Image (cartoon, coloured by chain):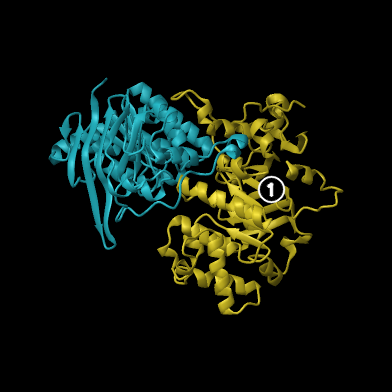
Chain colours: A cyan, B yellow
Amino acid sequence: MSTPILELRSVVRHFDTPAGRVRAVDDVSLTVRAGETLGLVGESGCGKSTLARLAMRLLPPDSGAILFEGTDLAKAGRGDLARYRARMQMVFQDPLSALNPRETIGRILEQPLLVHRRGGRAERRARVAQLLAHVGLRGDIAARFPHELSGGQRQRVGIARALALEPRLLLCDEAVSALDVSVRAQVLNLLLRLRGEFGLAALFISHDLAVVRHVADRVAVMYLGQVVEQAPRDALWRQPRHPYTRALMAATPVADPAEARARPPLPLTGELPSPIDPPSGCRFHPRCPLALPRCREDVPALRLAGPEHTVACHLA
Amino acid sequence: MTASTRISAVAEGPAPPLLQVSGLCTTFTTHAGPLPVLRDVSFTLARGETLALVGESGSGKSVTAASLLRLVEAAGGRITGGRALFDGVDLLALPPAALRAIRGGRIGMVFQEPLSALNPVQRIGAQIAEAIRLHRPLSRRAAWARAVELLALVQIPAPELRARDYPHQLSGGQRQRAMIAMALACEPELLIADEPTTALDVTTQAQIMALLEDLRRRLGMALLLITHDLGVVAGVADRVVVLYAGRVVEQGPVERIFAAPLHPYTRGLLDAVRLEALPPGSALPEIPGLVPALHDLPAGCAFAPRCPRADARCHATPPPWREGAPHQGAACFHPLPAGTGRHAA
């Protein structure tokens, strides 16, 4: 097994709001190995975006360790943080709000090089041209503004910017979720190609199981601030253990009329509870088709269910 | 399948379609000049049938729904041609009062974002009751009771209590259920649902689609479902209309569209979402290039610049509509062979 590039150990982050304490990330441990893609799936409010911001140390954790190449970012000073942040970069869902509308694409791509003092003016120019070529955009795009580009082109710019400092790890937060399907295929192909070319590791956060299945080596499933199951891709789809994982798989639409209509009804009741005051015991118990009385009281611990396969369920 | 036999009988058959749209054209006026957002859109919808309008952003699927209800006019659009016969009456030619009576009455509507479609300062029950009283001579008390019944119908727990809530007090899924309850207030014959689950999580989406399908069956409604999600289409539609750059490029029964599409664009869309058919991590089949800008449409087929089958004629002349298989047609000079699927012609 290769070495971890990113490791989260028992990370906790709560937010106090007027409505109560949001337990956004509650004791989460995850590892992304060098060159590997870890998929992180879950629905709104499960804490997956907070987790990405914690991993980048854009947010400090309440407790726990965030190790990037062995250094704890939770304890790192500003200088160290800046250095590590260059090596881990984020790709956001909505490139239009992530790109400064008043700067040209060339300026936007040059910005990280300036901040991190990489190269002289001519070298930076050359690097911008190279970055545009990497993501399949023509060089004349550099003179344009974000609003002049299509959604797919903007996401390519977002990816080019993330690549500017030659990171080791990409954090993709719903990076293809806002794109039309034909464009989504193009951007996914770009990410797959760059991952191979540069040997990038990735934390690929998405609500879309089909996409995660295609890009991830291993997958972690989050529910209300906690990882409920984690496994290598094939093992997870061969034998999903957690009832929530099974429900997510059953709810993911399939583009085949016969298969879609042959499906049994969703094995899930009720709606996603609020992450404020999450349910006692197993957080999934109010919606779980299999819940027993003990699920209401005892918090299930993550335990090994197979090689590299962990699950937090009393019944799995 | 019954639905598709029904539509083939339209020409001289005894059962006229509930909705017959022909030659619908809608143009938006912008500072860059007039934008032809819909160009000659035609389709029919039988009673009790589910028809999916699918396409990517800018294909015109939402504008089609908004045109049928003449909501485009408020958004700067103009219907420049065509007819939309609803039970024999042209919606596009109706006087405003008659149109209002149908909108929210015999035709219900559900939108993508219930939070912006619901009044934030009025209780859910009161909004539904008001919608009922617009169309039915009921007392306030009777309308409120009916509102509570409707909330129960869409499976909102404790409907008496939820009726007293304001929209922000409900979850996203419950708000969409409340929107559906309101759309059903007058037992519509046709429900138009524009991306009803796009803003929702997958498990909530599955629950809402199951609810819509159950209600459609029980109430005998027709459903015009507008969506970009081919997975959702596969789950509920009887027939499918595929839009590209404001034109219908293909339509047919759902099994045919998915198993043996005629139009290369339909094929490309299907390939792009069928990730499970590919080895993990492998390159996805791509549709190269971009959707054309509506103010700069190609002279011929709008898909030609991206199409692997295009030749000189495709670039020069808009392709006419052709039936490629029973009940299935496409606007394409070079449709895929009908034998691509299970039903060789």
Q: Residue furthest top?
A: A1
Instruction: Pick whichever, A290 or A207, lies toward us.
Output: A290
Let me know if residue A119 appears in the view. no
Q: Residues within 10 Å of mark 1 (few under 14, many from 20)?
A: some
Q: Is residue A89 left or right of residue A234?
A: left
Q: Is residue B332 left or right of residue B72?
A: right
Residue A287 location in percent, x, y? 41, 49
Number of numbered labels in the structure image: 1
Instruction: Pick whichever, B49 or B102, lies toward us.
Output: B49
Residue B338 location in percent, x, y? 72, 28
Which type of secondary structure does the marked residue at label 1 adopt?
A: strand
Residue occupying image coordinates x 38% and y 45%? A291
Instruction: Pick whichever, B156 or A194, lies toward us.
Output: B156
Chain hosting mark 1: B
Q: Which residue is mark 1?
A: B39
Residue B136 location in percent, x, y? 65, 74
Q: Residue furthest right?
A: B12
Among the 4 quarters of the image, the one containing residue B188:
bottom right
Residue occupying image coordinates x 39% and y 34%? A241
Instruction: Pick whichever, A180 or A221, lies toward us.
Output: A221
